[in-house]
Amino acid sequence: MAERRPDRWLGPGHHQEFWDWCAKGELRLQRCASCGGISWPVVNTCEFCGSDTLAWEAMSGRGTITSWCTFERDYYRGMLPIPWDTILVELEEGPLFLSNPKGFSWKDITVGMPVKLAFIECEDSGGTYQLPVFEKA
């Protein structure tokens, strides 16, 4: 059964392409053909050089935790169980990716802890989708 989540950003730009790759079980981010920089979150032009020659490149799904936060207030009016954890993962390819832990909590986290990509089925007002999360490597 899909977890109910707050609405994703599905606005203008290439956001839907990101979610389409996730639906296929792939974490892909935009790499610039001009300078090689990887942009995240989704952009229309490279954040490093301004080029619009961006292509979706598969990420390894490996990374390390650089920080985390545990929310103890009900910001989403009962939608998420309290407390809920977020993690900041530095992907092997360099970008920082804000996500949720799968199968562990803040009690288990250490800076530099290796993690690997997983997906969980979620739903919001836009429908069901695959959310990239991270589990212990």
Image (tube, rainbow, N blue to C red):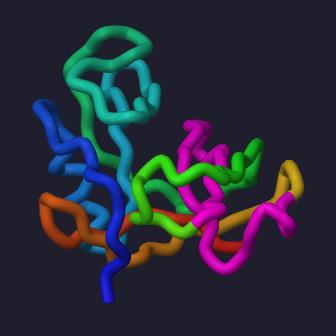
Relative to 26, say whether 42 is above or below: above
Q: Residue 104 in the image: x percent, y percent? A: 73, 74
**Which residues fall within the magenta stretch?**
82-109
4 relative position to 88: left or right: left
Question: How many numbered marks appear?
Answer: 0
Q: Position of residue 77 (x, y in %)?
A: 41, 56
Q: Is residue 36 left or right of residue 135?
A: left
Q: Could you tell me if residue 78 is visible in this image?
A: yes
- Residue visible at 36% across and 53% down in the picture: 28
Q: Quadrant of the C terminus?
A: bottom right
Residue 80, above or below 68: below
Which residue shows up at 42% across the image and 76% down it? Answer: 120
Residue beneath the point at 11% across and 31% down: 12
Residue found 70% across the figure and 52% down from its top: 70
Name the image quarter holding the N terminus. Answer: bottom left
Q: Nearer the viewer, residue 135 or 107?
A: 107
